[in-house]
Image: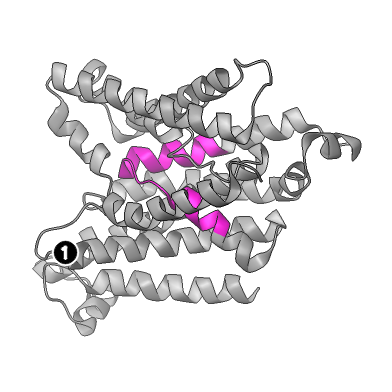
Amino acid sequence: MFILLGGTVFLIFSIAISILFGAADINLQTIWQSITNFDSNSTSHQIIIGLRIPRALAAALIGAALAVSGSLMQGMTRNPLASPSIMGVTAGATFMMAIALIVMPHASNFVMMLWAFAGAGLGVAIVFGVGSISKSGLTPVKLALAGTAVSAILSSLSSAIAIHFNVAKDMSFWYAGGVSSVQWLHVQLLWPIVVIGLILAFILAKSITVLALGDNVAKSLGQHTLLIKTVGTIVVLLLTGAAVSVSGTIGFIGLVIPHITRFLVGVDYRWIVPCSAVLGGLLLVIADTVSRMVNPPFETPVGTITALVGVPFFLYLARREGGKM
C-alpha cells in the first residue's frame, strides 16, 4: 500500500513537472491560470492546455499500459525476459501500421488503433508459433529468442515497406517512439481502452499469481489455464496495441517495471498489477521530461531514454536468470 500510494503521489508530481518544463518558459502561476481561467488568446495557455497536459496524461497512460502488459506476459509465460517489445507485440503493431499507411493513408486515429491491435496479435501468434516448433516445446529461453528474432524480422519488413512505398517519413515517428505529437483526441481514444485493460488485468491478477507457479500447479488447484492465458493475451493486445498506436515503439518499460515491482511488493499480482501501472506511468513521464531537457530546444526520442535503462537491465537478467523464472 505504501508503494502504491507513494508511487501515485510521485506520479502526480511528475505530471506537474512535465507540464512545467518545455521549450517555452512557463511559470506555475500561468499553468494555474490556464486551468482555472483559460484564455484562448494566450499562447502560453494554448501550449499548456493543448500540448503539455495531454502529453503528460498520455505518457502516464502509455507507461501504465506497457508495464502491466509486461507483468502479465511474465506471469503467464513464467519468463523473466518477456515484455511487449521483446515478444514481438510492439514490432507486430508497428508492422501493421506500416501496412495501414499504404492501404489507408488517410485513416482516422481510431482505425490506426485497430490496425495496431491486429498487428500486436500477429506478432504474438508468430512468436508462440516459432517458439513451439521444437519437440521440447516452449521454454523461457526459446520464447525470448523467438521474440527477438520475430521482432527483428517484422521491424526490417516495416522499414523495407516504408522505404519502398515512400512512407518512411510517416513511419519515423513510430520507430523513434514518443508522445510529442499527442493531442486531446489521442487521449480520448486511449484512456477508455487502457482503463478497461487495467480493470481486466486486476480481475485476472489472482489467477495470474497461481499461474506463475506453473501450469501443473494451477491445474491441480482447479484453474482453467487456457482460459486465463487467452483472456490475459487479449488484455496484453489491448493495452499494447493502444499504446503503440499513439506513442510508437517505446521499449523496455514492460521489462524493467514488473521486476522492480516484484522486488518491492512480492509475487502477488493483486499488488503487482496496480503498482506496475503506477510505476510504469511514473517512469515514462520522467523519461519524457528528461527527453526534453537533454538537448533543448530539441527533443531526444523518449525510446532512447528508456533504452538506456532497459538494455543494461535486460543483459543483467539474461545473465542472472539464464532464461528461467
Front residue of 60 and 309? 309
State which region is magenta: 236-259
Kindly identify the residue that appears in the image at 26 percent across and 38 percent down.
174
| Magenta run includes residue 240 | yes
* Mark 1 neighbour density, 10 Å: few (under 14) some (14–19) many (20 or more): some
- Circle 1: element type: helix
Residue 165 appearing in the image: no
Query: Residue 64 location, x and y as percent?
Result: 48, 54
- Amino acid type, callout 1: Gln
Query: Residue 123 location, x and y as percent?
Result: 46, 25
Dividing the image into 4 quarters, which one contains the N terminus? bottom right
Residue 233 appearing in the image: yes
Instruction: Please determine whether, in this image, residue 16 is positioned above or below residue 169.
Output: below
Does 267 sit left or right of 3 as displayed? right
Residue 149 in which image quadrant: top left
Residue matched to label 1: 46
Residue 3 in which image quadrant: bottom right
Type of colouring: one colour
Kindly identify the residue that appears in the image at 64 percent across and 31 percent down.
139
| Magenta run includes residue 60 | no
Query: Residue 94 location, x and y as percent?
Result: 33, 30
Query: Residue 170 location, x and y as percent?
Result: 17, 32
| Secondary structure mostly seen in the magenta stretch | helix
Kindly identify the residue that appears in the image at 34 percent across and 66 percent down.
286
Kindly identify the residue that appears in the image at 40 percent across and 35 percent down.
90
Front residue of 196 and 310? 310
